[in-house]
Amino acid sequence: MLFRQRCSSATMPQPSCDSRSRARQRMLYGASTWTVLVTTASIVATVVAARPAWAQASPDTPAVTVRGQTYTPRSILARNMGSDEDQTTAFPPHKIIGNVYYVGTRTLSSFLITTAAGHILINSTYERNVRTIAKSVEQLGFKFSDVRILLGTHAHGDHQEGDALVKELTGAQVMAMREDVPALEAMRPNGRPHPIDRMLRDREEVSLGGTTLVAHLTPGHTRGCTTWTMKAAEGGKTFNVVFACSYRAPATVTPEIEAEFTRTFMMLRTLPCEVPLGDHPAQYNMAAKHARLTAGANPFVDPANCWAEAEIQEAMFRAQLDLQRKQAK
Ligand SMILES: [Zn+2]
């Protein structure tokens, strides 16, 4: 069921669904072929010829090299998602900077922003992770029931499937970028409707207890993909924190998506940034930075790598477009 839920969604990352469904479909296919074999050879020939495209192994192309590292569509997805265990096992909750904390799993980010008037949570991730996130919040010494506002980066199940349960447990107001609302409303874990208490427009502000987050519309990965920014104070200084959306292009780039990404990649670099974060921890090298937390200077302050992830995804997006155009000729 979970498998089907994750992979039947048109909005879900394709390669992981592809590789898993291929394995399953190979099994199913093998079984049906056996049945056919014991009937007639001609039927076998017909079935093999009709083997659908999804059952064929597609090449993992294109490959791009950015800052000395080579990426392919599958390597990016593997890096983002890890194993099922990685997606559901809590990463040690930790303070990132100021009033910003990490409360997600090893590969699915969830961020807690604490204020005296209650807390803001960004990304509920999968519904089955909500209680793990709640536990991480409590481990840090905060109350999960104090979450007043729930935000998200984009309308895919691995980031926002748990919204209804978070609202049920905390009574938080769920706010989402207008363009992502149809996809969010189609997300119904266990049949529960997806709550939306406030629809946001590009650059709209969300404030609580003296902290203000700005919602930047950065479409491409989804129509309403949202990059959140805020200022965090630490050691008498103020830092610009960027909670990046995913900027990974889908398997097929339509002219509409091309236009969205072209605008997104240009706009991103205009945002002030000293602390880059992302909706998958690998996008900002969380584990390596976390390992350096006790070493003095805050490793999450990393302006040199603010747009490293956007650089990788833009290179991949351009290479995908080139390949798509060549194949269309
Ligand atoms: Zn996604």
Image (spheres, grey):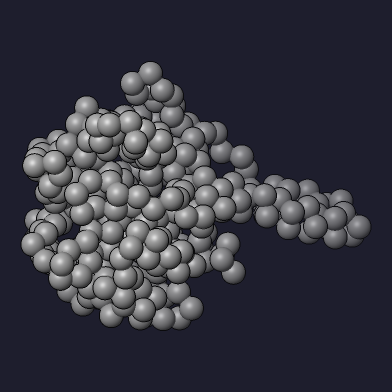
Quick one: quadrant of the N terminus? bottom right
- State the image quarter where residue 140 is shown: bottom left
Q: Is residue 123 left or right of residue 39?
A: left
Q: Position of residue 255 (x, y in %)?
A: 26, 45
Q: Position of residue 263 (x, y in %)?
A: 16, 42
Q: Nearer the viewer, residue 249 or 293?
A: 293
* Residue 19 visible in the picture: yes
Q: Position of residue 57 (x, y in %)?
A: 61, 40
- State the image quarter where residue 306 is shown: top left
Q: Is residue 78 left or right of residue 271?
A: right
Residue farthest toward the top in the current orientation of the protein: 68
Q: Nearer the viewer, residue 129 or 233?
A: 233
Please state the total of marks drawn on the protein image: 0
Q: Which residue is found at the position 55% from the left and 33% from the top?
A: 59
Q: Position of residue 189 (x, y in %)?
A: 45, 74
Q: Nearer the viewer, residue 75 or 147?
A: 147
Q: Is residue 274 above or below residue 175?
A: above
